[in-house]
Amino acid sequence: MKFNKFLDDIKVYEAGKPIELVVREFGVNPEDVVKLASNENPIGTSPSVAKVICEHATKAHLYPDDSMFELKSALVKKYDVDESNIIIGAGSDQILEFISRAKLTEGSSVLMSRVTFAMYEIYARQVGAEVIRTPSYEHKVDEFLSAMKEHKPDIVYVCTPNNPTGDATTKEDVLSIIEAALKDTILVVDGSYMEYAVAKDERYRIDPKDTLGFDNVIYLGTFSKAYGLGGMRVGYGIANESVINALYKMRPPFNITSLSLAAAIEACKDDKFIDDSISLHQEQIVRYETFAKENSFE
Ligand SMILES: *Cc1c(COP(=O)(O)O)cnc(C)c1O
């Protein structure tokens, strides 16, 4: 069978190993396994969210609210933006797919850091676009600017903090990249771990409200990490209305299940869970940094 030739260059995304497989392979007790392989939240599921998911179980015969009114309202409150600035995806991953399909075609190019989130490349290759990477592991502004000048990419990805290297980019640096972008280049600021970076240093805070003035920037957030809802698949994009309107044309109807919507809405109310997630992270990052220093890791 012949498939689209772009498929030859695509590696299948390697998901983190599930607990069940670790138990089978190493013969350990499932209770002793903490799954972090896809950067899940080690605290688990917020009890109030679990309760709401159960309560919604009896409404499985109904299609979800496709306007996602309540979840958008919660995000409007969180970010002080307008409902028309928001699109919700089955994970922010789905928004990445919308952006790639809306913007790229054969011969397009995307620019990203040398090591970053694997799906940026996979979605680009699915539509035959070329992938350009800056030389350094960290996001270096001068490298981004010169690559942008040379290649005029259609999409530029800034993942801050970056997965998997953990380097965060200051707001000042992100703005330098945004300001240097051509009008027709979409800048994607992937803030999947923003909550953690901001807790460490305010200079890393990218407020989606601040980038709405640019009509070529989209901020991505997710409920999968600090909010502990990786299994529910809810993420979002915040951008100027013209970008959101274009992405909406790529969206399949009812892309967020009713249980996922209910879970995300409840998660927005559970400040304690977020605070606990961040505090645990703050403690552990010190342990990790000490360990790295003692062992002379770069
Ligand atoms: C986890 C992650 C995502 C996607 O998360 P979803 O679960 O699809 O919302 C996107 N970008 C980065 C950098 C991530 O680490």
Image (cartoon, rainbow, N blue to C red):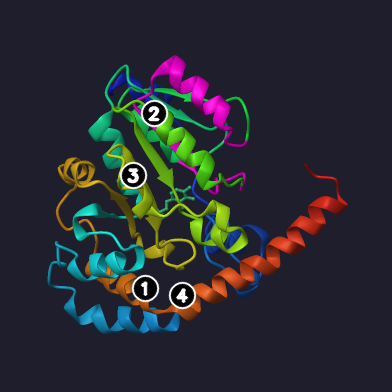
Looking at the image, is mark 2 or mark 4 earlier in the sequence?
Answer: 4
Residue 12 seen in this snapshot: no
Q: Amino acid at mark 4?
A: Thr
Q: Earlier in the sequence, mark 4 or mark 1?
A: 4
Q: Is mark 1 within 8 Å of ligand 1?
A: no
* Circle number at residue 218: 3
1 vs 166, nearest the viewer? 166
| C-alpha separation, residue under disc 4 versus residue under disc 1 | 13 Å
State left or right for residue 292 relative to residue 194. Answer: right
**Which callout, 2 or 3, points to the residue nearer the camera?**
2
Front residue of 226/245: it is 245
| Marks 1 and 2, the one that precedes in the sequence | 2
Q: CA distance from mark 2 to mark 4?
A: 39 Å
Q: Which residue is mark 1?
A: 268
**Residue corresponding to mark 4:** 45
> SS for tag 1?
helix
What is the magenta range?
138-166
Which residue is label 2 attached to?
Answer: 181
Relative to 250, is 213 on the left or the right?
A: right
Question: How far is mark 2 from mark 3, CA to CA?
Answer: 13 Å
